[in-house]
Amino acid sequence: MKRLFILLILLSVSLEAKQAKPNIILLMGDDHGWEEVGYNGHPYVKTPYLDEMAAAGLRLDNFYAQPTCSPTRGSVLTGRHPNRYGIFRPGYSIRPEEVTLAHLLKDAGYATAHFGKWHVGPVKKSSPTSPGAMGFEHWLSHDNFFEMDPVFSLNGGVPKKFYGESSEILIDEAINYIEKKKQAEQPFILVIWYGSPHQPYSGIETDLALYRDLPQKYAKIQVSVTSTETGLRVKRPLRDVLTERYAEITAMDRSIGKLRNALRTLGLKDNTLLWYCGDNGIPPSGLRESRFRGLKGKVYENGVRVPAVIEWPAGIPKPRVSAMSSVTSDILPTLCTLAGIDTPKVPLDGIDLVPLLQGAMTKRSKPIAFWNFPVGKNQVGKPYIDPQLQKGTTPLVKQMAGIYTRNFKNNHHPKITENDFHGARAIISGDYKLVIDGDKNTGVELFDLRKDSAERNNLANSQAVIAKKLQEEMREWQTSVLNSLMEADYK
């Protein structure tokens, strides 16, 4: 009996050790604005499953991404600002030397898989920046965004068309993968990056029907979107566009509900960390009335603040709401801590949020910075990667430069000049946000986000000491970023 008792204790300890490492699923919407969820009070959009996650887990009310999609995706993968490795904007690739969360967790015994939008390089097998090269052992991915009946490449192979609603397709494939990893008793990290609600917009009839009665006032506003028939820009009434956009959000939300139900059925829900966020703020084609300033591509709140929720019953047993500022760069260091591994020995811009998950953090230890790098002809060095390896293969609806695929670029930076420090930029420290050249002729602006999240009241003159201090912090941070851009981190 004594031996049996000892064996039971050892077995219990062993099971607890196995449970210490959670499964991880990172979900990301494409162009999903902070206000476009039910739990943030949107008057029209229906997101019942994200609302359930927000009510059951940790709601991150002040969560940030970069102003556009590819830079944000780079920050998730590396924990570093994308300017450090040349992802200045969409269409730029990551650099092969970067260490990603998939590399790190794969080495720690995790199964690693990517589904959906990649957009930090081509997904073909020969690409040195494909999901496979960046640490994912399995991928069903697209070079860019996608709509209904999407085309994906499986593990870098010849692209294949899948028929149906794209969000549902991704989740069905992800669930199949999860079932296999459960049978193998292997912890997993899945990165699922949706193509919704990025334009051009579409939707299935049952989702469209939910939004047919939007106010007529939106019918009087014309917005520019991509035609699903020609792939070229057309003008359409905002009311029709919002109907389709909101239908895409609801379809994406429903797929999240399907994933949550699958995790529950498989007995994996308790120890699976499910983290949803958007990749940048709302685009012009989705903008109606808003409490925030700016839009996608800008460093103002409507360009960088995104919805974010974390559900993890084993680690977050009670619902909470955090007002502390956090950002996509925080994801890598947080996951490294949860997996019990070290972060890469390079400058990181994110921080470990595990104390926040545990309810023990209310103040951020490091500022959050945004920076639209001033790309110009005089700053372009030789290609970092053979241009042939940067050519995409997965077609999409939107035509660009006469083609329906996407190519990427990344260049060696020739030298640092004063002009390299320019471009719209912002830094958040505590309650204050400094914005420099956010719009044409706006100069230096300082906002108290706690009192003025709409960024209407410029305090740069009345709070000159704070403004100067944040400008100095911004300059110091930019110097570090440019040092990384010049490849110092790879030596």
Image (cartoon, grey):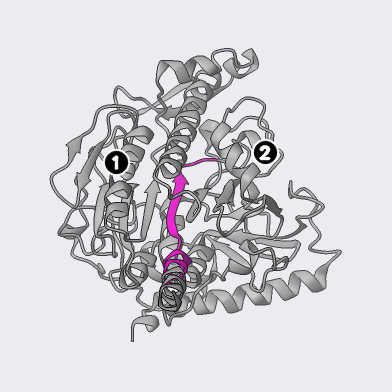
What residue type is disc 2 on?
Answer: Asn
- Where's the N terminus, which quadrant? bottom left
Q: Could you say which is closer to the camera, residue 75 or residue 314?
A: 314
Name, please, the residue furthest toward the bottom. 491
Q: Nearer the viewer, mark 1 or mark 2?
A: 1
Secondary structure type for disc 2 = helix
Image location (x, y in percent) of residue 297: 52, 48
Name, please, the residue furthest toward the right. 462
Q: Between marks 1 and 2, how big is the CA–CA gap?
A: 30 Å
Q: Could you say which is closer to the camera, residue 142 or residue 342?
A: 342
Image quadrant where residue 265 sits: top left
Q: Give the residue at x 62% y 54%.
A: 317
What residue type is disc 1 on?
Answer: Glu
Q: The magenta stretch spans which residues?
A: 14-32
Image location (x, y in percent) of residue 118: 33, 51
Q: Is residue 354 above or below residue 453?
A: below
Which mark is on residue 40? 2
Q: Is residue 256 above or below residue 200?
A: below
Q: Which residue is mark 1?
A: 173
Q: Could you say which is closer to the camera, residue 194 or residue 382?
A: 194
Q: Is residue 198 above or below residue 183?
A: above
Secondary structure type for disc 1 = helix
**Drawn side of residue 247 relative to residue 322, left or right:** left
Q: Give the residue at x 45% y 38%.
A: 261
The answer to whether residue 30 is visible is yes
